[in-house]
Image (cartoon, rainbow, N blue to C red):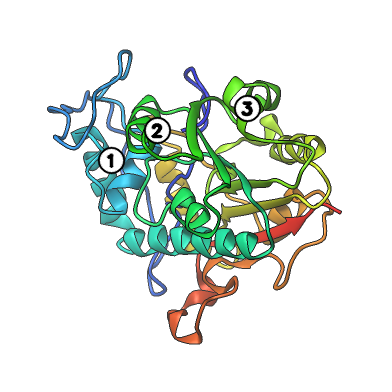
Amino acid sequence: MQGSGDDARPIDAVPLEAVSADAGPIAPDPVDTDPVDAGPADPGLVEVPVGVDPTQPSVARVYDYYLGGSHNFESDRVFAQRVLAQLPDMAMVAQENRAFLRRAVAHLCALGIDQFLDLGSGIPTVGNVHEIVLATNPDAAVIYVDHDPVAVTHSRELLKDVPGADVIGGDLRDVRAILDHPLVRERIDLTRPLAVLLVSVLHFVSDDDDPADVVARYLAAAAPGSHVVISHASEEGRPDASGAQAVYNQGRSPNRMRMRTGAEVTALFGGLPLLEPGVVRIPLWRPESPDDVRPGADRYPGVAGLARKG
């Protein structure tokens, strides 16, 4: 999760607006203001960092739950089950988003990009960015950025014996702090092309925080030939998805959500030239095979694209 403090924005967040194609309008459950009994941490957790409130769900840990991970607390599972009760396709939605991330990273590796800044990396899963990148180029560099202490702690444990990959805690909105971090300065050469990954995170950055400006500042610091990858929740063509947005905008929610239209997501690229096929529904961005495209992909509640800085 990105950021720090009460209004921190998450990373690699679950696009909770996914609903089945035949679902009607969704009404959110009443806000539950009672504390959630978090129970003990799962055995898979390396440790529970000081200052982490296990009774408060986290978008990164909820996302981990949808992907079948074990690095989550009971509060995360309770929240996830409330969403699943209304959005039964959630696991598929999360999997499609991760599959897009892998396709985009593999494409960037094929273009010769060997530096990756993953903003909103969440809790690592199989097939994560560093595994794809370092299998292609062992000399490449991957920096993960997350604000969730559990995600950062587990990432550090996972990466401690992985040359070429590191993780830092930070708020993606604080561009200067991220780029000036000692590990970033050590591992990333901003005079050479860089890939900036903003996958399933900007729908948790409010209009007041100006996500387009956040993207622009990262790209302004990057060399020509750099690329930016964005995936984003969208209710365009899916009016029923507004109920899902309401789930994340309840009092017990880990973070508030701002879904955007395809045109709004395109604007986040700041006019940079988009690689084909442009900004499209996430499963339709360069699928490896036509057989990989599930029925109803043209109504998937999220869009994605990849652009290049000239």
Identify residue for label 2: 254
Q: Residues within 10 Å of mark 3 (few under 14, many from 20)?
A: few
Q: Residue 298, percent across and down?
A: 55, 76
Mark 1 and mark 2: Cα distance apart in space: 9 Å
Which residue is outermost to the bottom?
Answer: 291
At x 82%, y 37%, the residue is 220
Taking 91 as reference, is 179 left or right?
right
Mark 1 residue type: Phe
In the rendered structure, find residue 255 and report the number of the disc placed on it. Answer: none
Identify residue for label 3: 186
Taking the image as drawn, is residue 14 in sight?
A: yes
Q: Residue 69, percent across and down?
A: 26, 48
Image quarter of the C terminus: bottom right
In the rendered structure, find residue 79 and report the number of the disc placed on it. Answer: 1
Per the image, label 3 sits on a secondary structure element best described as helix
Question: 135 above or below 124?
Answer: below
Name which of mark 3 and mark 2 comes first in the sequence.
3
At x 54%, y 43%, the residue is 201
Per the image, label 2 sits on a secondary structure element best described as loop
For the residue pair 213 and 209, the one nearer the viewer reads as 213
Per the image, label 1 sits on a secondary structure element best described as helix
User: Of the residues tagged 3 and 1, which is closer to the observer?
Assistant: 3
Mark 3 and mark 1: Cα distance apart in space: 39 Å
Name which of mark 1 and mark 2 comes first in the sequence.
1
